[in-house]
Image (cartoon, grey):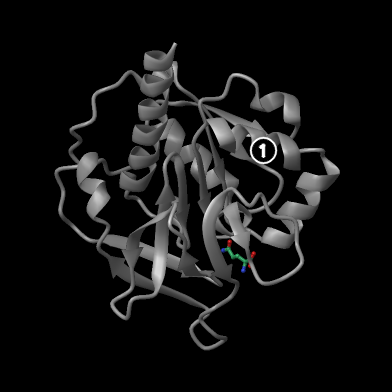
Amino acid sequence: MRKEQTSLTYDPSHLKVGVLALQGSFEEHLDMLDGLGVNVVEIRLPGQLEGLDGLILPGGESTTIGKLAVEFGLLEPLRTFGGEKPIWGTCAGAILLSRDAHRTQPLLELMDITVDRNAYGRQIASFETELDIPVLKTVSDSTAPFNGIFIRAPLISSVGKDAEILAALPDGRVVAAQQGHLLATAFHPELTEDDRVHRYFIHLVLEKIRSLWQES
Ligand code: GLN
């Protein structure tokens, strides 16, 4: 796997990051995190959230993932986890993080964003495009654009006052947002060879650990 130069210094083997493994493209996230030397755990049950430093909600089908989360008794534990620790949602995962998806489906409602599912229409349901994501400079010296892979992706249709825009398409449509330790991307960095967004998430995980240390 190709690695970009990084300005990030940490011992990743001390971190434990989970990937929700109910449905969808969770394997690719596990591989990417593994490549960064982080301890990775597949999460299917509430008790497995114990001791995690961060969690990724993968792409897939947000209605299915949401229903399974309800069935496995994970919805409330995930909400509590996200209130304290970093969560990154990709695509369906971003939908789960949103406070409103304009449909009736289980959501975590952790981020002050709303989304429109399958927002790009049938003709261009899946596409790739180069994205400028300025915050990646935090973890990489590279200024190369990020290859955004969109698969029946949601549009982040509004970003409330508590959240900020990290990336948008040239026409202004928002495709990535952050709210403190919560991150949402409408595209799939785990399907690329470029680990900068994963490293940015690890950076958020480390920031959180540092701030919890300072508080205690
Ligand atoms: N279309 C899916 C949904 O609405 C998301 C697609 C994806 O995660 N790649 O849940």
Left or right of 33 on screen, residue 89: right
At a point 42% along the width and 42% down the height, the residue shown is: 180
At a point 33% along the width and 18% down the height, the residue shown is: 11
Ligand 1 location (quadrant)? bottom right
- Name which residue type carries label 1: Leu
Q: Quadrant of the N terminus?
A: top left
Secondary structure at badge 1 equals helix
Image coordinates for residue 20, horizontal then vertical, percent: 63, 41
Image coordinates for residue 131, horizontal then vertical, percent: 29, 65
Q: Quadrant of residue 147?
A: bottom left
Name the residue furthest bottom. Answer: 123
Q: Quadrant of the C terminus?
A: top left
Does 10 appear above or below 46?
above
Image coordinates for residue 112, horizontal then vertical, percent: 52, 56
At a point 38% along the width and 71% down the height, the residue shown is: 128
Name the residue furthest top. Answer: 216
Residue picked out by circle 1: 78
Towards the viewer: 85 or 64: 85
Q: Quadrant of residue 146?
A: bottom left
Q: Is residue 18 visible?
A: no
